């Protein structure tokens, strides 16, 4: 039957008026043409009836497979390549060209399931083509960013919450960051703990703990907290970068991108420092040749606390590195404790130290708030607000 069907269609095609018949004679009488046409029509109807159910079953199977792939593919993570035209166009050519570029296949599908259903099927193939491009692109994992551990000492004062809030508004925009907020106190406070939860920043809340009596009074505020932070990092962190960020400074978010890939120790300028208005490494022809600071004081590294970051693996290779309780020499003592470390080892950031991305701002000191008259304002909101006053 298949051979006859092919013969009839072939014969019918040869009878088309626009085709040239080379040197062969055919019976072109009206009766003969009509008889041949009827046979072709009967055979076409017979083939359609015989194959219609099988074709519908095949199309239904393909449709189910498409639905399955589409539902699974859309559950995958998105990447920017989802909206890239090149990947989508290539997928369309890969999936649709062998199927719908053949006019006979397109006509046959329309005859069996109708024009509207065939258009819907084509749309589903298009959708599958787009999602197939997703499958090829989401398998590539994003690059792993080194974690930045920001160590911030803080202490109770009228400006504390205002400055911590300002700092948190910057840190919450930095990827892969853990904030070590360390109170210069014997224990942590509930107020700071609740504040950290509200920020949504990954954090560690610690206290510096009791300080030896000989360091009280004239001790530099924050040294105990920074050493406590270094202790926690040595015990809990494997790799990344450490940065000492005081709560009264102002930070450009670009600074954290500059420090993230520090190999040993990186440095950059700090603004609003002493009478010079600036503390920075001095760079000539891409090399460190000295330091510019309002107070050198015989220091090997006359820099500000906010001007450098340290690689954690490098830090852990110097197990005795610590910060000394000596006013004005905290930074210098810590950097020297990382020995062997020479100025030539310093990694210069911020476009060879030509840009200022952090400022040593200072909030105006406020006098302690006067006490609230409990008898007069009992039962009002002032009772709760009093907890925020220092």
Image (cartoon, rainbow, N blue to C red):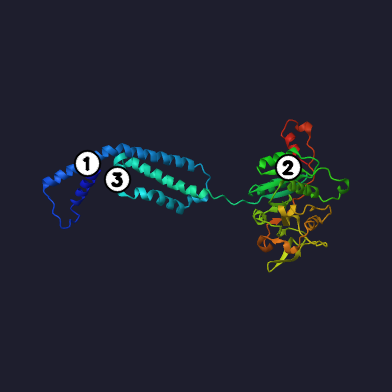
Q: CA distance from mark 2 to mark 1?
A: 84 Å
Q: Which residue is mark 1?
A: 43
Q: SS of the residue at dot 3?
A: helix
Q: Position of residue 196 (x, y in %)?
A: 69, 42
**Residue 51 appears in the rendering:** yes
Toward which corner of the image does residue 332 lie, by quadrant? bottom right
Which dot marks residue 142? none
Q: Earlier in the sequence, mark 2 or mark 3?
A: 3
Whether residue 123 sits left or right of residue 293 in the image: it is left
Question: What whole-number distance in Å separates the C-alpha atoms at marks 3 and 1?
Answer: 17 Å
> Residue 288, image x and y in percent?
72, 65
Q: Position of residue 252 (x, y in %)?
A: 66, 54
For mark 1, does the 10 Å Cα neighbourhood hold few (<14), some (14 to 19), or many (20 or more) residues? some
Mark 1 residue element: helix
- Is residue 360 among the parts visible in the rendering? no
Residue furthest out toward the bottom: 285
Task: Please tell me in which quadrant of the rendered image residue 197 appears.
Answer: top right
Residue at point 69%, 44% (across, down): 203
**Could you say which disc has been placed on residue 107 in the image?**
3
């Amino acid at each position: 039957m298949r051979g006859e069907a092919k013969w009839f269609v072939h014969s019918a095609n040869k009878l088309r008026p626009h085709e040239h018949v080379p040197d062969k004679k055919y019976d072109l009488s009206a009766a003969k043409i009509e008889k041949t046409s009827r046979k072709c029509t009967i055979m076409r109807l017979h083939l359609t009836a015989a194959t219609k159910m099988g074709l519908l079953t095949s199309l239904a199977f393909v449709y189910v497979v498409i639905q399955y792939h589409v539902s699974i593919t859309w559950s995958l993570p998105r990447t920017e390549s989802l909206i890239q035209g090149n990947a989508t166009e290539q997928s369309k050519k890969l999936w649709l060209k062998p199927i719908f570029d053949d006019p006979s296949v397109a006509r046959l599908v329309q005859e069996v399931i109708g024009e509207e259903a065939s258009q819907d099927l084509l749309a589903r193939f298009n959708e599958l083509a787009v999602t197939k491009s997703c499958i090829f692109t989401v398998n590539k994992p994003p690059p792993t960013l080194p974690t930045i551990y920001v160590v911030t000492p803080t202490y109770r004062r009228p400006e504390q919450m205002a400055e911590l809030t300002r700092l948190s508004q910057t840190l919450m925009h930095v990827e892969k960051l853990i904030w070590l907020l360390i109170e210069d106190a014997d224990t942590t406070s509930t107020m700071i703990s609740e504040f950290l939860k509200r920020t949504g920043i990954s954090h560690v809340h610690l206290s510096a703990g009791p300080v030896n009596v000989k360091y009280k009074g004239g001790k530099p505020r924050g040294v105990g907290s920074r050493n406590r932070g270094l202790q926690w990092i040595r015990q809990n962190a494997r790799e990344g970068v450490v940065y000492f960020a005081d709560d009264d400074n102002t930070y450009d978010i670009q600074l954290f991108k500059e420090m993230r890939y520090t190999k040993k120790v990186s440095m950059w300028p700090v603004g609003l420092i002493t009478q010079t208005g600036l503390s920075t490494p001095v760079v000539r022809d891409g090399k460190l040749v000295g330091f510019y600071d309002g107070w050198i004081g015989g220091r090997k590294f006359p820099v500000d606390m906010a001007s450098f970051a340290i690689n954690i693996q490098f830090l852990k290779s110097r197990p005795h590195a610590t910060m000394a309780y000596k006013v004005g020499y905290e930074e210098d003592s810590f950097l020297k404790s990382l020995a062997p470390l020479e100025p030539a080892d310093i990694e210069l950031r911020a476009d060879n130290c030509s840009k200022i991305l952090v400022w040593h701002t200072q909030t105006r000191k406020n006098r302690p708030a006067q006490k609230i008259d409990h008898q007069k304002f009992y039962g009002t909101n002032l009772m709760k607000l009093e907890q925020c006053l220092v």
